[in-house]
Image (cartoon, rainbow, N blue to C red):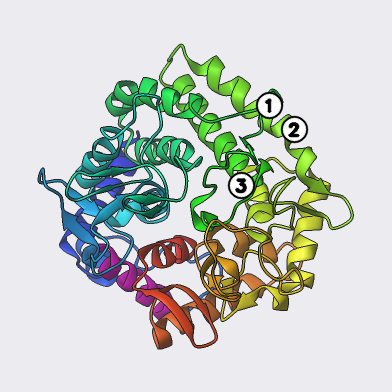
Amino acid sequence: MDTRRGFLQKMTAIAASSLITDRTFAQTNGLKYNMGNPYGLSAEMVEWMREATIQQLKGCRVKAHDGTWIHSPDGVGNYKALWTRDFYYMVEYAGDLIDQEEIKASIHYLVNGQRDDGCMPDRVYASGEVIYSPGAPGKPLADHAVDNGPFMAMLLCSYVNQFDDKALFLELESKIRDGLAQIYVKENGLVYNDPKNPQCVYGFTDIVKKTGYLLFTSLLFYKANLEMYTLCQKYGFKESSYYKRSYEYVKQSIYRLWSEDDGMFWAADIDCKQIDIWGSAYAVEVGVTTPEQTQRIANFLVEHYDEYVQRGQIRHLTLSDGVWEKLFIEKEPGTYQNGAFWATSLAWIAPIYDKVKPGLTKRTLEDCIEDFQKNGINECIHGDYVKVPNFVVSATNVYGLTK
C-alpha cells in the first residue's frame, strides 16, 4: 500500500468512528471537500447521503455477548444480529465509514460460526446463536442459504482489499475455501438448487423458491472465487488455481441462463424461470457478459424503466412479469420480495443507465435520495407500503454511488 493511500484510509476510519462531518474532516486534514460525486449530484445531496449513512451505521451497532461490536441490518439495532450478506454490503460500499478493527472482529464473529460441513452462517445473534438459513430462529425455511459462502468470501476480500490485511487473509483462506466447497455446483460450474430439496437462494430473494441453475448465486460464486484468486496471486498463495477453475467455469456456462429473445438473464431455469432485473444487471457488474449482452441488458433496463422503478428504487421483476412463480412462504403481491421496490440493487443497476440514456443514473439517484429524505431510508417500498425503516444497506449501497 502506498503511503498516501494508507494515510487516507487511516484518516477516513478516524472520521467515521468519531462521526465528524465531511466538511470538518476535509478542513482538518487539508483535503478537498466532497471528492468524487461521479454522477453530478448536488454537493448538498451528497453530504446528506454521507451523513445519513453514518447515522445508520452508528445506530445499528450492537454489542455482542463477547464484547464484539456487530452491525445489525436496521439503523436502530432492533434485529440484534450480524447478517453475513448485509454486512458485506456495508463494508463493500461504506467501509470507509466503519472502524477497521470492528470490521475485522465481525469477520471473526461470523467465521467462528462456520458449521462442520463448511457452511457459513446466514447470521449470528448478539447472544452467540448461529443461524444458517433464513427464517425465524427455530423455523428455518431450509437447511441453509446457498449464498452464505460467497458473501463470506467477498466480505473478507472487501476488507482485505481496503485495508491490505494480508495476515487475516492467510489466516482465514482455508475456512473460506471450505465454505465455497460446501455449495452444490454442477459440472459446468453453475450453482444448482435441487427442486426436490431446495435451499434458500440469494438473500434479498430468500423467500423465493428458485430451482435448477441459479443466476444470482452463480454470479456471487464467480465474484467470490475471482476475488479470492486475485488475492492469492497478490500474496503468492499456492491455492489460487482452485479459485481460478471455479470462476472460469461460471463464466463459460452462464449463457445457459441467457434469454436471447429478451436480451436478459433468467433467475433460474426450472422454478422461477423469469427475467431477473437485479441479476441481469449484476452479471454486467461482475464482468461475465459479452459486449453485446451488456448493451442488450442496458437497452432493456432503459426501455422498461417505468415497469420496475418507483421513486428511484428497484423491483426484482417487471410489473408485466408480475410476481415470483414459487415462494417458500406466501407474501401478498406487491410486498417485500414479491413485488416491492428496493434501493439495495441501485449499487450495480444505476450505473448501467447512462450507457443508453445519459443523465438517467443521476435522475434515479436523485429520486431515491429525495424519497429517503421525505419518507425515511426503508428496506423496500410500494406506494404507501413500507418495510423495515432505517434499513442500513439501502443507505450504504446508495452512498457508495456518491463517492
* 194 to 171, vertically: above or below: below
Q: Amino acid at mark 1?
A: Tyr
Q: Amino acid at mark 2?
A: Ser
Is residue 33 left or right of 201 when viewed as pictured?
A: left
Marks 3 and 1 close (CB-CB < 8 Å): no
The correct choice, above or below, for 303 with respect to 208 in the image is below
Query: Which residue is under mark 2?
Result: 253
Q: Which residues are magenta?
A: 43-57
- Check whether the beta carbons of the residues at disc 2 and disc 3 lie within 8 A of each other: no
Q: Position of residue 366 (x, y in %)?
A: 53, 79
Residue pictured at 70% horizontal, 54% vertical: 272
Q: Work out whether mark 3 precedes mark 1 in sequence or the reverse, and give the earlier one.
A: 3
Query: What residue is disc 3 on?
Result: 216
Q: Residue at x 32, y 53 (%)?
A: 96
Residue 394: x %, y % from top left: 43, 66
Mark 1: which secondary structure? helix
Instruction: Measuring from the top left, give residue 398's x and y in whole percent.
Output: 47, 66
The residue tagged with tag 2: helix, strand or loop?
helix
Who's the residue at 37% across and 68% down the image?
A: 391
Name the image quarter holding residue 241. top right
Check residue 53 for magenta coloring: yes
Front-most of residues 221 and 397: 221
Q: Amino acid at mark 3?
A: Phe
Q: Quadrant of the N terminus?
A: top left
The spot of residue 252 in percent (x, y) is 74, 30
Pointer 1 residue: 249
CA separation, marks 2 and 1? 6 Å
**Label 3 to label 1, Cα distance in Å?**
15 Å
